[in-house]
């Protein structure tokens, strides 16, 4: 109860110091890692994936990079000050779980010369680190394009601040205990990690595109040292001037650097794995939050959603977050979607989910969002998102007998299609080489969702879903699909729910994303749902 109350206080601006007795020390950590890897099915493509790892806290450390008391950039100083109380609470929770905390305020080590945490650390050195630690990029970054221009120093203030070195120590809001470590040397820290048998390393602090990635103790060098390293992406910041290329907001610059790190350097995580609450967000980050939820194995949405999200970052200044399930139809952990807490502050949810059962607490997050009055964009298999075709055991196995007690089952929502989408999914017709002819419903040609759609329609390579008759009286059908010898079917409609507007399309084949009309529909749907207009 004390821990619960303490976490609530964080969001009211009161950040308590948790006592060790409030945390169970030594429990295995369940860490949810997000990364971008080469696609197995599409050459040259990248997919976003989630991996759950279990870590021994005694083999895990957190390094806090350059959270100085003052930066030469006023904006950077303000963001560090804003982030520090939340970070300190995460560190307290982590410390009480048994993790080693390493404070690394570069250029300030003399300030701590008499601190017990400094005296302990300076005894260690790593011969291996002395040979391999460097400032070079990793081989995995050989052909990578750096996503932002930081050549002017990255100050986003006006007028620009004068560069210098005003820092003297780590910001006071971060508590340093005698049992912690203090060092800005990768060689020392590596030696300490060898002594304590540290395998897993979490980096947080500033700035991701400079010190966090490049210091001797930074992400690249932890990779070189063979550590299982991860960036806590919500407790970091970039030095990026929004007037520089690609001329996006400062916070979108953060997101672009996170993308780069996940693709070329190491996975990322969020503080939720420690706090159990929403991740940290800067108060100045007012971008609408788009929550992409993907959990299906047919339509490559773990590739198409991140590609689409990247366009939204650059063109619409949206904050795109991901909740990810395994792209499989059976096997271990198929009935799991990680990072669903992003729905709690999402402004729009975009889904492509197929036949998943979830823990009741996760299903509650989804149901709460669907009752919140906020919008949904549902794609393709979302019509049968939470109907697993039978009871599913909490153990994560396959379908079980109907007499299994409810308490032993994962939660489902087979009525989601009718109750939320207004649909009536009954399967689909066979796969045709010709595809599906998609047409605009008469009178809907000027609807804002269809702006830029070919007036003569287009051909989708996907097979046609059967949805007639639709189940809601509040529907507005915009597109229909047809194949030879079968009734015309609705393929795109708006459900004007009291609990939040919904756009659903049974389109969403992986090659639909190559069709200009479909891409325009997706972009238009974002605008329509975030900024409702009278039809």
Image (spheres, rainbow, N blue to C red):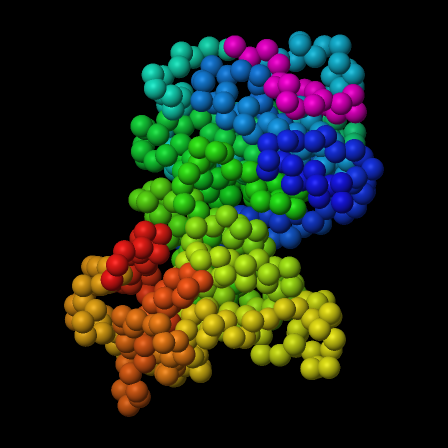
Instruction: Examine the image and state in which quarter residue 152 appears.
Output: top left
Please identify the dominant SS of the magenta region. loop
Q: Please report the residue visible at 49 percent of the width from the left and 57 percent of the height from the top.
A: 372
Please indicate whether residue 474 sits to the left or right of residue 289 in the image.
left
- Per the image, is 274 magenta? no
The residue shown at (18%, 63%) is 446
Span highlighted in magenta in the image: 166-189
Front residue of this view, candidates 338 and 492: 492
**Which image quarter holds the C terminus?**
bottom left
Does residue 459 show up? no
Determine which quarter of the picture holds residue 114. top right
Residue under the point 38% across and 62% down: 501
User: How far across and how far down the image is residue 277, in percent?
Assistant: 62, 45
Q: Residue at x 42, y 70 (%)?
A: 421
Q: Identify the image quadrant of the N terminus.
A: top right
Q: Is residue 398 left or right of residue 46?
A: right
Q: Depth check: 70 or 36 in front?
A: 70
């Amino acid at each position: 109860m004390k821990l619960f109350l303490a976490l609530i206080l964080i969001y009211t601006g009161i950040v308590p110091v948790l006592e060790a007795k409030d945390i169970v020390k030594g429990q295995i950590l369940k860490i949810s890692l997000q990364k971008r890897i080469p696609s197995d099915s599409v050459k040259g493509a990248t997919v976003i994936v989630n991996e759950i790892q279990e870590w021994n806290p005694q083999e895990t450390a957190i390094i806090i990079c350059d959270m100085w008391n003052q930066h030469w950039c006023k904006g950077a100083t303000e963001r560090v000050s804003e982030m520090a109380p939340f970070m300190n609470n995460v560190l307290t929770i982590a410390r009480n779980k048994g993790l080693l905390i390493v404070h690394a305020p570069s250029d300030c080590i003399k300030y701590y010369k008499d601190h017990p945490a400094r005296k302990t650390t300076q005894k260690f050195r790593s011969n291996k680190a002395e040979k391999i630690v460097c400032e070079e990029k990793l081989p995995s970054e050989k052909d990578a394009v750096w996503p932002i221009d930081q050549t002017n120093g990255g100050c986003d203030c006006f007028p620009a601040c004068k560069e210098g070195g005003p820092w003297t120590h780590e910001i006071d809001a971060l508590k340093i205990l005698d049992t912690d470590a203090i060092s800005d040397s990768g060689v020392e820290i590596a030696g300490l990690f060898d002594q304590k048998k540290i395998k897993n390393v979490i980096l947080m602090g500033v700035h991701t595109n400079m010190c966090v990635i490049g210091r001797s103790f930074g992400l690249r060098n932890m990779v070189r040292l063979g550590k299982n390293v991860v960036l806590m992406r919500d407790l970091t910041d970039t030095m990026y001037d929004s007037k520089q290329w690609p001329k996006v907001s400062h916070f979108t610059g953060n997101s672009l650097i996170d993308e780069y790190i996940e693709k070329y350097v190491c996975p990322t995580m969020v503080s939720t794995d420690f706090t159990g609450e929403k991740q940290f967000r800067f108060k100045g980050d007012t971008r609408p939050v788009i929550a992409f939820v993907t959990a299906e194995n047919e339509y490559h949405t773990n590739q198409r959603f991140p590609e689409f999200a990247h366009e939204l970052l650059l063109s619409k200044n949206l904050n795109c977050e991901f909740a990810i399930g395994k792209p499989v139809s059976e096997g271990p952990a198929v009935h799991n979607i990680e990072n669903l807490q992003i729905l709690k502050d999402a402004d729009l949810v975009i889904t492509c989910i197929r036949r998943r059962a979830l823990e009741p607490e996760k299903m509650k997050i989804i149901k709460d969002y669907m009752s919140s009055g906020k919008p949904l964009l549902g794609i393709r298999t979302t019509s049968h998102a939470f109907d697993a075709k039978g009871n599913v055991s909490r153990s994560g196995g396959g379908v079980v007998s109907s007499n299994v007690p409810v308490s032993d089952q994962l939660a489902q929502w087979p009525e989601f299609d009718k109750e939320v989408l207004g649909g009536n999914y009954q399967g689909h017709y066979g796969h045709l080489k010709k595809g599906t002819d998609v047409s605009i419903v008469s009178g809907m040609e000027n609807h804002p969702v269809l702006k830029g759609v070919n007036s003569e329609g287009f051909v989708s390579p996907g097979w046609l879903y059967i949805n007639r008759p639709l189940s809601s009286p509040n529907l507005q059908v915009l597109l229909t699909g047809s194949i030879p010898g079968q009734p015309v079917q609705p393929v795109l409609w708006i459900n004007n729910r009291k609990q939040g507007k919904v756009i659903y399309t049974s389109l969403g084949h992986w090659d639909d994303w190559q069709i200009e009309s479909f891409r325009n529909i997706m972009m238009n749907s974002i605008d329509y749902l975030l900024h409702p207009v009278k039809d």
